[in-house]
Image: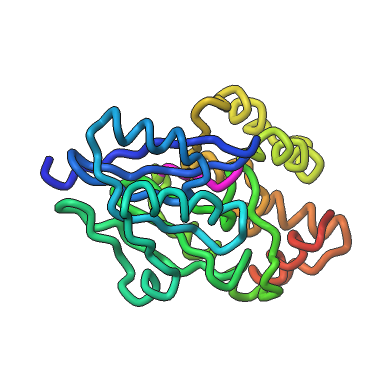
């Protein structure tokens, strides 16, 4: 297929993930902290790394950018540029870019075909902290991601799966989908589908009867979707 792109996940700094999106000749690095591994991969595939960018501006996601630029001559795409263009052209394909403020004000996600790189906006099993302080924007961002097809594959910025499922059990101890979700977890290649997330991730389940009942039992606001979102985000 002329627009077929592939993805490669790289783990670095214990639980961080970075990614290469690549075609037959060219590649885009997102959160490129695994510098040596990325360079080895592109060399092995005879790929030219032409773009480098980030899901957001936290240092653990921008680390390695200068080294990659110096060694490959790749262009760094800034959040402002990506928000303006709303896409990155790679070979004959377009990687769509969506602004998803909440975790940070400059948070972005990258989407093509059935794949979604979500950074620290949406993790496999949880969501990021609202460091921006804007819970309303975060709610809108998560609501937008929930609108993607259920077979969308989520590639996140960190591996928090086991800790996330421990928390999910605290919130919904009777949720029978948590154990199957954990059985599919592979630390070598961490991903899930939105369908998976809607079964176990409390922050995508805020409109379900089960989560509504949990919030009411805890004496938390649950009248509207946004009330439920804020209440979930307040649980520690």
Whether residue 164 sits left or right of residue 91 in the image: it is right
Whether residue 26 sits left or right of residue 218 in the image: it is left
Which residue is outermost to the front? 70
**Residue 156 magenta-drawn?**
yes
> Where 130 falls versus 61 (above or below)?
below
Whether residue 8 sits left or right of residue 105 in the image: it is left
Rendered location of residue 76, percent (x, y): 38, 62
Which residue is outermost to the top? 183
Foreground residue, 213 or 187? 187
> Where 39 falls versus 50 (above or below)?
above
Tell me which residue sits at (84%, 54%) in the image. 236
- Which of the 4 image quadrants contains residue 233? bottom right
Whether residue 211 sits left or right of residue 23 in the image: it is right
Tell me which residue sits at (58%, 73%) in the image. 105
Tell me which residue sits at (63%, 41%) in the image. 200
Rendered location of residue 218, percent (x, y): 87, 57
Rendered location of residue 234, percent (x, y): 80, 63
Foreground residue, 21 or 209? 21
**Residue 137 magenta-drawn?**
no
Please tell me whether the stretch drawn in magenta is mainly helix, strand or loop.
strand
Q: Which segment is the magenta one?
A: 153-158
Where, quadrant-wise, is the N terminus in this rendering? top left
Question: How many numbered discs, if any?
Answer: 0
Specify how the rendered protein is coloured. rainbow
Tell me which residue sits at (70%, 41%) in the image. 164
> Where 211 falls versus 199 (above or below)?
below
């Amino acid at each position: 297929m002329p627009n077929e792109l592939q993805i490669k996940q790289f783990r670095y700094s214990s639980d961080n993930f970075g990614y290469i999106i690549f075609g037959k000749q060219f590649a885009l690095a997102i959160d490129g902290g695994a510098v040596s591994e990325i360079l080895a991969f592109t060399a092995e595939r005879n790929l030219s790394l032409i773009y480098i960018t980030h899901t957001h501006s936290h240092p653990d996601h921008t680390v390695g950018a200068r080294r990659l630029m110096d060694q490959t001559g790749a262009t760094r795409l800034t959040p402002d540029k990506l928000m303006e263009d709303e896409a990155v052209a790679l070979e004959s394909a377009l990687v769509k870019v969506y602004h998803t403020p909440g975790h940070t004000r400059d948070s972005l996600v990258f989407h093509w075909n059935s794949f979604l790189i979500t950074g620290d906006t949406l993790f496999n099993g949880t969501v990021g902290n609202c460091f921006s302080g804007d819970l309303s924007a975060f709610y809108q961002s998560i609501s937008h991601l929930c609108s993607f097809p259920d077979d969308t594959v989520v590639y996140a910025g960190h591996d928090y799966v086991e800790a996330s499922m421990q928390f999910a059990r605290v919130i919904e101890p009777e949720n029978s989908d948590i154990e199957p979700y954990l059985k599919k977890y592979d630390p070598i290649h961490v991903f899930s589908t939105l369908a998976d997330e809607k079964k176990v991730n409390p922050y995508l389940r805020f409109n379900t009867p089960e989560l509504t009942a949990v919030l009411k039992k805890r004496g938390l606001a649950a009248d509207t979707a946004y009330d439920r979102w804020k209440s979930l985000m307040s649980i520690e």
